Image (cartoon, helix red, strand yellow):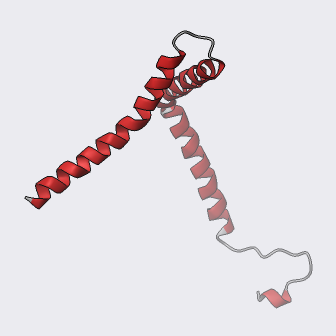
Amino acid sequence: MPLALLGHGSTLSLPYHGVVAESRNAAEHAGTLYRRAFSWLRHPVKRLEHEAGHLHEVEQAGESEVTPLIAIAGIILFLLPIVAIVLGLSFAAYFLAR
């Protein structure tokens, strides 16, 4: 039926609406299954995030005697990947230039 012949308020029923709805439901169901199956992978990450947040709060408050160590460890953990990448690129350039 051409769209011009549809009256006001009527809807166009196309055959693929059911397929789209079924595929959406299937995708939601698969996402739920993956979330349940791999929740054990997210648990250690959440624990580390919580610990990092706690250490950040301790560092900001300055209440602990290990506050300078926390700050230094944070700087080292931030700079370590950068140094590793620079060294890796330097060695790669050296060996490719030979």
Which residue is pictured at 44% across the width and 35% down the height? 78
Q: Quadrant of the C terminus?
A: bottom left
Q: Quadrant of the N terminus?
A: bottom right
Task: Please tell me whether residue 25 is drawn above or below residue 8 in the rendered image.
Answer: above
Q: Position of residue 47 (x, y in %)?
A: 53, 22
Q: Position of residue 74 (x, y in %)?
A: 47, 28
Residue 56, quarter of picture: top right
Task: Please tell me whether residue 48 is drawn above or below residue 28 in the rendered image.
Answer: above
Task: Please tell me whether residue 9 is drawn above or below residue 37 in the rendered image.
Answer: below
Relative placement, left or right, of 93 versus 15 is left
Task: Please tell me whether residue 91 is drawn above or below residue 58 in the rendered image.
Answer: below
Relative placement, left or right, of 16 versus 52 is right
Relative placement, left or right, of 24 versus 91 is right
Which residue is pictured at 18% across the width and 56% down the height? 93
Which residue is pictured at 50% across the width and 31% down the height? 42
- Seen as rendered, the residue at the extreme left is 98
Count of numbered tags: 0
Residue 95, quarter of picture: bottom left
Q: Position of residue 38 (x, y in %)?
A: 48, 33
Q: Position of residue 77 (x, y in %)?
A: 41, 31
Which residue is pictured at 25% across the width and 44% down the height? 87
- Seen as rendered, the residue at the extreme top is 65
